[in-house]
Image: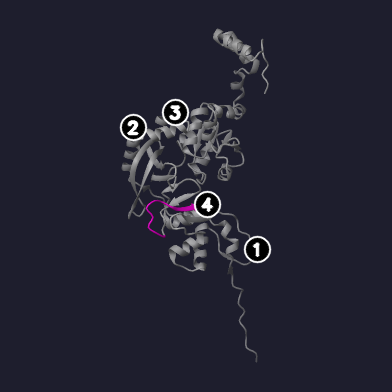
């Protein structure tokens, strides 16, 4: 009599190729290493967990889904990071990475479709303040703001002026300078040193972020001194329902555009091209119209712009300029000139009705101000033309 055979269901198998493009390497790094002490350039920066690293040299690039340490040269993807830090097998590492990303690693076929998911907020550890103690961070921001206007801060002040910021803008933003500060790691076992321009974020009177923009040539470009739930710079209150809103990539561009066109549009930033929209920011932005996104003129800037949604109007810096600091450097008042067509398009009809254009503007100036009339006559004589001229666009 033939023996009975037990039928087994085909075992589910792991399909890493179908998963890897949907894994958020940033979520994996945060889960393993905590919040990054530095952000800037392409991605986020940590102290390398693979060697003794005094300055953050371990970079995670969310766009490429890769990590690399510029100190020891090691690099890889999310699974390789888990394998290196946990000393585990490939299969166990894939399982761990998939759980962090909210994706099932077990696929019945290689053609199984996986929705493109980013890491769920609940998969990340609860966020807590990082960096210096709050009181020490507040003291650093205050002292740095005063030091900027001393001979010790002269080089940093010149840097800010070269970025197009005037003294009033610099003082209002409470920018400062620190020559040298020791910042503790999250575990508190060691510290690293930083110097440069201090940028601070506030939510009302509460300090939410203090970071240092280090001098050119030092990496990472930005280092967090203190971080406690920052949402948007300069503040959430800057986003006014029913008013125009412009989103840029970094704090200095934000301050520059607010300085140049802030009378026509509110200007905010999330801090970098890799930052995500907080739910409170999303709700506030819904009431703004129009919404302009003026991130940098590169691939990272274009990708960041898409995070603001389909109704956002993309305004790229002109050809030859990567950001709005470059635009300002290329010609004084050029920012206001280039933004004219966007902001006039966004202006209410009753506001436009009060303004004069073309020949009417010339006639108005001549009628109201004899000095303007004389200047226009000298200008016409200089270019060899007399009488009233028609403006062409």
The residue tagged 4 is 62
Q: Is residue 205 left or right of residue 316?
A: left
Q: Which mark is residue 3?
A: none
Q: Which image quadrant: the N terminus?
A: bottom right
Residue 307, percent from left and from top: 56, 44
Q: Is residue 51 magenta?
A: yes
Q: Earlier in the sequence, mark 1 or mark 2?
A: 1
Label 4's element? loop
Earlier-in-chain disc, 2 versus 3: 2
From where the camera sits, is residue 228 visible?
Answer: no
Residue topped by disc 1 = 111
Badge 4 or badge 3: first in the primary sequence: 4
Reply above or below: 11 against 147. below
Residue nearer the viewer, 298 or 273: 298
Q: Quadrant of residue 372?
A: top right
Q: Is residue 306 left or right of residue 70?
A: right
Q: Are marks 1 and 2 in contact (CB under 8 Å)?
A: no
- The residue where tag 2 is placed is 151
Would you say the residues marked 4 and 3 are in contact, meaning their CB atoms lie under 8 Å apart?
Answer: no
Say if mark 2 contacts mark 3, CB within 8 Å.
Answer: no
Q: Is residue 131 left or right of residue 350?
A: left
**Mark 4 to mark 3: distance in Å?**
34 Å
Q: Which mark is residue 166?
A: 3
* Main secondary structure found in the magenta portion: loop
Q: Is residue 69 above or below residue 165?
A: below
**Is 331 within the magenta?**
no
Q: Earlier in the sequence, mark 3 or mark 1?
A: 1
Q: Nearer the viewer, mark 2 or mark 4?
A: 2
Quadrant location of residue 390?
top right
> Who's the residue at 42% across and 27% down the image?
168
Question: Judging from the image, what secondary structure is the residue with disc 2 in?
Answer: helix
In front: label 2 or label 3: 2
């Amino acid at each position: 009599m033939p023996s009975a055979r037990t039928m087994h269901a085909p075992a589910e198998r792991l399909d890493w190729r179908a998963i890897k493009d949907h894994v958020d390497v940033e979520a994996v790094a945060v889960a393993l290493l905590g919040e990054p002490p530095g952000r800037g350039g392409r991605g986020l920066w940590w102290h390398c967990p693979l060697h003794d690293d005094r300055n953050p040299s371990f970079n995670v690039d969310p766009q490429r889904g890769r990590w690399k340490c510029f100190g020891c040269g090691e690099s890889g993807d999310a699974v390789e990071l888990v394998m290196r830090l946990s000393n585990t097998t490939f299969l166990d590492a894939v399982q761990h990475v998939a759980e962090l990303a909210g994706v099932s690693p077990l696929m019945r076929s290689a053609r199984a479709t996986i929705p493109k998911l980013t890491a769920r907020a609940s998969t990340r550890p609860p966020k807590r303040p990082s960096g210096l103690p709050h009181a020490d961070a507040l003291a650093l921001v205050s002292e740095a703001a005063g030091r900027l206007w001393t001979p010790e801060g002269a080089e940093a002040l010149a840097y800010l002026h070269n970025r197009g910021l005037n003294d009033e803008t610099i003082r209002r933003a409470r920018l400062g300078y620190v020559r040298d500060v020791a910042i503790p790691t999250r575990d508190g076992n060691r510290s690293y040193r930083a110097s440069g321009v201090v940028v601070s974020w506030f939510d009302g009177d509460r300090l939410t972020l203090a970071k240092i923009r280090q001098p050119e040539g030092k990496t990472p470009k930005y280092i967090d001194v203190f971080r406690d739930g920052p949402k948007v710079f300069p503040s959430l209150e800057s986003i006014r329902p029913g008013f125009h809103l412009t989103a840029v990539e970094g704090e200095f561009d934000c301050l520059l555009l607010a300085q140049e066109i802030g009378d026509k549009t509110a200007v905010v930033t999330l801090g970098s091209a890799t930052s995500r929209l907080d739910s409170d920011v999303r709700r506030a932005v819904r009431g703004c119209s129009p919404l302009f996104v003026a991130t940098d003129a590169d691939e990272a800037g274009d990708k960041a712009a898409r995070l603001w949604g389909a109704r956002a109007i993309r305004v790229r810096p002109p050809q030859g300029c990567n950001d709005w600091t470059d635009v300002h450097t290329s010609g004084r008042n050029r920012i206001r000139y280039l933004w004219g067509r966007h902001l006039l398009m966004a202006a209410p009809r009753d506001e436009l009705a009060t303004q004069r254009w073309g020949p009417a503007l010339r006639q108005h100036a001549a009628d109201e101000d004899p000095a303007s009339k004389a200047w226009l006559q000298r200008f016409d004589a200089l270019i060899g033309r007399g009488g009233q001229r028609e403006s062409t666009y």
